[in-house]
Amino acid sequence: MDDDHLDLSPNGENGDAASSDEETIKGEQGHEDIADVEEDQTSVASDQPTGNGVIANRYRQLLQDRDDASEAGSAEGIPRRAGSPIDSLLSVPDDSPSLQGSMISSPGSSRVPSLASRPGLNSPTPSFRPFDRRFQSRISSPSSALSPRPGSPAFLAGHSRQASLTSQFFLEVGDAETPTPPWEVVRWTKLKKLNGQAFSEAGKRNLGSPTCIAVSASIVLGTTKGIILMFDYNQNLKMIIGPGTKAVESGPITAIAVSADYTTIAGGHSSGNIFTWDTSRASRPFLHIPPLDDSQLQHRTMDGHMPRASITHLGFLGTRHTALVSADDRGMAFSHLATRGTGSLGRTVKTVRILGRYPDAPPPASGKPLKPSTVLGFSSLPLGNVERATDTMGLTAMLTPYLLVIVSTTPIAQTQHKSARPKDVAPHSAMTGCLAWFPAVKLKVPDPSTGSTMSKVKLVYCWSNVLTVLDVDEVPSEDKDKPPLLKFKARSRWKCEEAIVAVQWLSRSVLTVLTITQRLIVLEDRSMRMTEAFDLIHKYIYHADLFSNQLHNLVEQLDEEDTSMHGVVADAFYMSFKAYKGRIFLLGFNDVSIGALSNWADRLIALMENGDYIGAIQLATSYYTGDANKLTVGLPEDAALRHRMVRDKVMEIMRASLKYVFGQRQKNKSSVDDQQLRHLTETCFIACQSVGDLDFLFDEMYEWYEDGDAEGIFLEVLEPYILEKTISIVPPTAVKAMVTHFVSKGWESRLEEVICHMETATLDIDQITSLCKRHGLYDALIYVWNQALSDYITPLIDLLTLLIPLMQNNPGNFMEHENHEVNAVKMFPYLSYTLTGRIYPTGERMQDGVVSQAKAELYWFLFSGKSIIWPKGSSKIFRTQPTQADEPSFPYLRMILQYDAPSFLSALNEAFEDPFLNDSQEKQLNGGTGRDLPEEQIFGLTVDRQYVVSILLEIMNPNDFDPTDTIYLDMFIARNLPKFPQYLLIPGSTLDKVLAGLCRYPGLDLAEDAQLSAEYLLSVYQPPDISTMIPLFKKACFYRILKRIYRNDKQYAKLLQTYFEDPEDQTEIFDCIAECLQPHPSLPKRYIQEVHDVIKQHSRELVELDPTRAAQTLAAYAPGLHRFALDSLEAGSELQYEYLKALLEPDYETSGQPAATLDRDFIEQYVQLMCRYNSSHVSDYVGIVQATNLRLDKLLPTMEDTGVIDAVVILMAREGQVQDAMGRLTKHLQTLESALQGLVANADGHADDIDVDVKEAAEELLRGLQKYTHVGIWLCQGQMKTSKKLNAIGRRGSPSPSNLSPDEVLWLELIDTTVQITRRLSSVVSPSQPIKVSSTASPTPVLDSDKLVALLRSLVQHTFTALMTATSTESAGLSSNRLVAKSGGSLTFLRILRAFLTRAAASSPNLADLRAVLTSIFSAYAYEESILRLSNRLLEQQLFVNVKQAVELRQRGWRPRGSTCEACGKRLWGPGVAGNVFEAWEEKQAIENKKRAEKNAALDKSAVARGKGKAESPIEEDETYKGKGKGKSTDVGSGNGSSADQMSNGTQDVPGQITETNGEAYTRRRDQPLGPLVVLACRHIYHKDCLDALQAKQEANGIHREVDEFGRETEYRCPIDG
């Protein structure tokens, strides 16, 4: 395109298509809220993939196989495509494996797995289980399971892609370079001629620098000198407007607009003046709209812009030349309408303010402070190419920092829509705002989403980085004279990564967005996809700071925590960025540029010119399938139209690419290596599949590869398409080449799989069959014979031919024999597939006309009983024993059974499930006897299950076959007879032999199969004498069968014995015992005794199995066997303990059984066992057991041996041996003391070898001392309770001070023991003797002496604390007199203490040893006392604070919700309240001051009288209450009494009448005195008399009122909230 000429005619539509980049909103679901969509730069899903399966999107995966090798190569070769634009569309990692190097050979692929380990041909191992599996061929199974060769990349999962090459680098400023596609996303044209005139030094000097641009039929520029320049699209300066007029004196042009018919131009100036110019008479202004002058400002009678307010926005309304809208930088906007007249002087202009406030306007009534504002975005609705009602309404959209406002200016100014700034705008972001309309247009093709032939009016607006699209719907008005109602619906929202400064509609479906960093983003409407993004910083776009002075207060300065603040106010770009008829116009500081998005054809051509043919094919394919950005590149959304446009281009590019590539390879093969050629081949395959022209592959494309000697690459790429059945018909020449190529590569297995997926009609049968035999491809051979020739016998003969040398044991090549055996095994899956109506090896269903023929031929071949002549018509007999003259009967069946009977019977087991073997009458009807059938089919149709079983029984007799083979026939019969009893009739003698054969299975690994088969058979057959079979079942260990027999015959003893013998399911023994011993009225006692005998024989096994369940079961059904069961176990074993525990202490949650009532011997044995296995529980158990069940002499030795002293003490105390119990306890305490002393001494003597466990052992011993000290305390406390009861009964007096009672003696013994132990051990572990507690080799002590001493002292402290508690409790219980009780308790404590000190003095020469102990005791008590005092002090302090807060809250009162009574509606307080409120308040204050003075005087008198006598009490004022309940009264005036008196007396002293109306309003005389008010907790306020009247009414309606004893109401309740 020539830079000096632009072919942009103004004629035609105003715009062909426009799109918004918003995500689809939830509006279709009836929601008005906008679903926000974050910008996704990494994944753009395809719209609607077309084509067959996953191949339609095959191009996505091709990139996985890209060659990552170096780009070095011939200059003429296909260049590497590191920066290809297709990469931006399809970005996937290179992680797919190659096709080469992964194959599975045909041998072994279809073998039955168990045969791989067979030691010989004629002796299958018994481990083969033929009836638990189904045959499956390798090819029919999923390739992922059996074939590691990956499929074509076309069949992998889809990957995400990016919309454009540059979108993936969006906002990545740190990258040094941003790769660019071969094409220009936007083709820019600099207007050199225009720039030379407008931006030259002379032009700027004479005309001024351009400041804004408007585009329509002309390119119009405004300059700094107030001049307007108009250029046509040939860049000729057609007109200079303004020189010699007032316009040049009004300052720079700051806004410019062109009318709808291109004949009138309007310019707004920085001084506030607006001029319009008729382009046909541009010598003087058509219209002048001046700002307000100074006189008009003072006495404003008309609207207008303020002086020196720059006109920042300007626009024409509809088709009129005299109707304009404008906005200035002060935040004000106006509508201007000029009257008709002669010339500019004869016209008057009516200006109406539509936005903003004048500076001298009064503040709003709400009292809110005004925030600074301006008009960030402004646009009037342009005309579309279809007539709409909105064309005449003069719609204007304005965007301020806070609101979007849409106003209709005709016939009157009226706000149509308001919308606040979205909350999604990030705090502290850049403040920007812009908007753009797109009018309603007529569509060439109905909208695919709505079906409408006309698009809606829509508005896009942006605040900061949030872009929203608004649809405008017209709702016709009922009154035809009135304009329609407009419904505005926010449809889409999109969030950019940075602030947006300008936005324009490039077409109906495409938006262009300019960001604050001067990046241009292209967006698609509806889908909200960012299709392109690139920098325009090099364009030096003109921008100006128009808003920062006005919005200075909105930019954060000091308060950065205010989220409403913005970080910066961006410059204005809207005047420099325009779009018109799909072109982008940029006004820069130095030039004007025009840009157009490159369309799809341009991009393909650019790729071709760049040498990236593969990328061009891929991109063209994406255009065809609709996965690319259709709207951006000019493709229609309609698939049929798009396909017609792109299809020919795709084919043309493929032809050109193939011609070029093979031309280069012919010159120099290294210029295009095989990997590049493979990539091109894959791309072409995808393209042909996508466009549905597969004929091109073989008609044209394959010839290039044949001539270029590269058909191998073509065939390898073709392979996955054949396997996926995408391509099934291949020409014979290509098949021949494929066979040759794959065999040369050693890929016979892959070739076999490919052949099995082809249409056989295109194959050369002779070539394929000979090739398959030569290379052992028997799967393919069978497939070709079956599908091409409908021959099912020849493949079986070929496989049997392989068996003949193996069965004859002929010497030969071992590898050849092994290979033959592997292939021969394929006959079994072949038989299985064919006899069940499936095609081998693919597994597909056979056609109905063929399936009967195939089955009949095979049954005839196997079961006709004779040798056959094959092929038919020849004289060649197929013999299984060529060296012998005579063939045996059923030769082929016999040879197969001798080779592998299990596999054949397994295949036959599947065939038996097919309905073909039902009665022959059915087959005759279905097979069609009306036509002549060959012999084999007639015979095959007569074969049924009975015939097959009869033949098998005849052939597989014990004389000819080993039991290892006949066992499988027995299993076959046993399993099929229950399934087909109506088709099989077998004599009982034969079935008895079958059962006997199953019992004589050859190996243990077949035992389970044999038993299962016998169970099948016994379900339909009952032997005449089952008793004769039982020995066989026992020998064969068929326990399930034996259990069923014994259970049916009620032989419970044998049944239980069988359960014990069965190694499986041992846990069922307990259920069996329960079943056997259930009460049976008809069951003789002898049977029960036999069951008991069996239990006795196996009692040890029973308990070892589960002692808990064993005990529970025997307790429920055979309690007399408990002793027998226990004696059978090892004496003293844990099993005995678990058994007894389940009986005596069962877990109720699991067992649900109560404890058993057993003899004393069982309980004593349980306690003895518990001492050994759960000693900590002995004392608890002994405490709950009856004393008569325990003998002390029998249990004490065991308890003492195991150290369960606490239980010993409990038992002895229960027997009354309290003193002996204390003696045993003190002895044990001394034993623990000795152990601790020895431990410490040993630790000191072997400090180097000491173990960490010593420390834990010492602490454990001290805890033991603590435990048994508490046992002693328990003993003493129990003795005191006993003695207290005796004293109460016998009324004995207290002992003398010199004699101690028995319980006091116990306390003395315990205290003396603990003190002595503490004294002795303290000297051992005291920190004052570090030798005892620390090691010289280690700086840290071995034993934690502080902790040990604290534990020691706690012994004495706990003892003394318990003594004091016990004595005080005892004394309080003995006397009701507190003084006597206190003295009695003190005497007991003092007697014990005196006795203890006397004993200590006698045993020790001085009390120095006890000083530390006694000091710690009394210091502990002192410490506890101080803690209690401190706690009381803290509690009192906290209580004071809480009470103080409660008082303050109560005195603070409640603030009423309103200023009027909720009942009568009259004002109670505040401005406008009726009555003399202020005077009443003054009177009340005077009364309160008088009372206060009287009270002070009375206090002074009392102070004087104190010296002479008793002073008179001061006068007490009656305390006034604000009300007892939820309400509070407030006195606002004085009546006959104070408000408090009125409240307390419950009377109403207000004269006048109270009248109740339907509205519950109350009227009073105007001069009535002011009464008290009541404020409730819900903040409703009432006159007291109003509230009383309401509650009186509620009482009359049956609502109860609570009153006190004087008849006064105790609580007010709100009539509203209750």
Image: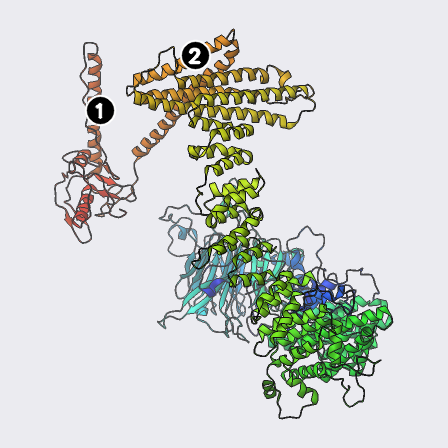
Image check: 1345 left or right of 810? left
**Residue of label 2:** 1395
Q: Secondary structure at mark 2?
A: helix
Circle 2: residue type: Ala
Q: Which mark is residue 1492?
A: 1
Q: Which of marks 1 and 2 precedes in the sequence?
A: 2
Circle 1: residue type: Arg
Q: Which mark is residue 420?
A: none
Check disc 1: other Cα within 10 Å, few if <14, some if 14-19, many if 20+: few
Image check: 1415 left or right of 52? left
Q: What's the CA distance linking mark 2 and mark 1?
A: 70 Å
Residue 546: % across, % down: 54, 52
Residue 883: % across, % down: 84, 80
Please give the name of the residue rendered at 56% of the width and 78% of the height, measured from the top-left corner: 982
Closer to viewer: mark 2 or mark 1: 2
Residue 956: % across, % down: 71, 75
Please state which of residues 1561 and 1522 is positioned toward the viewer in this rendering: 1522
Disc 2 to disc 1: CB gap under 8 Å: no
Please state which of residues 700 and 712 is positioned toward the viewer in this rendering: 712
